[in-house]
Amino acid sequence: MSEYEWDMKQLLISVVVVFTALYSAQLSYSQNPPGIQDCPIVSVTCPDATNNSTATFIANVTIGVPSDEPKYRWRVDGGTIARGQGTDSIEVEVDRRAQVVTATVEILNFPKECARTASCSILHSGYPRHWWQPVYDSKKPAWEILPQEAKPGEVILSKRNELGLLSNFAATPFTFHGKRYASLEGFWQAMLYPEGPRDPRAKFPGLEWKYTRDQVTQMTAFEAKRAGDLAEENMWRMKIAWVSFEGRRFAYRPRQAGRHYRLIVAATRAKVLQNPEVKKVLLATRDLILRPDHHQESNAPAAWRYFEILMNIRKELPRSRK
């Protein structure tokens, strides 16, 4: 082999060795960047789903290089942090309107080259968002409480959606003591009217009863309410504070729940049980606190608090097992 050929062979070998070394070094760096194998690992655990008003999220940190205790900062979508900000676990007050609740934690003192955040989401099964959908209505009547005025854990029984079926005003016919009523409001207001020609209310001089008791039983909503207002005017003129059912008189606004209240509860139960859609909507509210969609007197009698009556009836109803 000539000296020239020998030199060329040596040069080729050197080039191969250099490229091999460079490739090996590059491969080693790509697989194991400096410090990455020592990064702490953060994750968040949470339940798969919740029907509760609160949920707990927990941060899990596998400590690597950093010797200091982790510093936590949480962010939540679909709820608000009730307690635990700055710690490894938080209790979240779930927004009933949210379908998904997500908690994200950031470890503030992780090395910059490491992943510092992790999150976890839960499905909040159950309540239709439109029950709390804000309503902006310049013509809103003064008596109305809008859906967005509900506090956490509450729902307004708004007549603007299907929850209005639970209102006394709803056209939800039912039979009670053998008689058919078009609505609970019709049942309620009919008790203010004379039961027959011998009723003292029918014989009182100078009074006009625009409707008969039977006519009122077939009314719904504001028509029944207006009929009741007319009857209350007559009661004021007669200076009486009683109503009647099946010939028995009892106080209309008693301080303590009495016969009038028990009749309203029984009639409300009949309405719920005899109208499948009403029962379905009531059960769909599950554990929510029901609130009226209108302003009530602070000292209103128990019979007026139809939302509480409905919650008590809801407890009696069997719930389907999923």
Image (tube, rainbow, N blue to C red):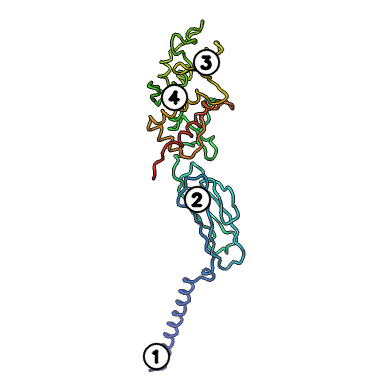
What separation in Å lies between label 2 and label 1 (alpha carbons)?
Answer: 71 Å
Return the residue found at the far front. 248
Look at label 1 and name its amino acid: Glu
* Disc 4: which residue: 184
10 Å neighbourhood of mark 2: few (<14), some, or many (≥20)? some
Q: Earlier in the sequence, mark 2 or mark 1?
A: 1
Tag 1–tag 4 contact (CB < 8 Å): no
What separation in Å lies between label 1 and label 3 (alpha carbons)?
Answer: 123 Å
Look at label 3 and name its amino acid: Glu
Query: Which mark lies nearer to you, 1 or 3?
Result: 3
Decide if residue 68 is on the left or right side of residue 155. Answer: right
What separation in Å lies between label 1 and label 4 (alpha carbons)?
Answer: 111 Å
* Disc 3: which residue: 232
Question: Label 1's element?
Answer: helix
Q: Going 40% across and 26% down the picture, which residue do you hit?
A: 172
Query: Which mark lies nearer to you, 1 or 4?
Result: 4
10 Å neighbourhood of mark 1: few (<14), some, or many (≥20)? few
Decide if residue 17 is on the left or right side of residue 109. Answer: left
Q: Quadrant of residue 256?
A: top right
Q: Earlier in the sequence, mark 3 or mark 4?
A: 4
x then y, percent, for residue 175: 38, 24
Question: Label 2's element?
Answer: strand
Query: Which mark lies nearer to you, 4 or 2?
Result: 4
Look at label 4 and name its amino acid: Leu
* Disc 2: which residue: 102
Q: Earlier in the sequence, mark 3 or mark 2?
A: 2
Q: Quadrant of the C terminus?
A: top left
Q: Earlier in the sequence, mark 1 or mark 3?
A: 1
Q: Earlier in the sequence, mark 4 or mark 2?
A: 2
Q: Earlier in the sequence, mark 1 or mark 4?
A: 1
* Disc 1: which residue: 5
What separation in Å lies between label 3 and label 4 (alpha carbons)?
Answer: 18 Å
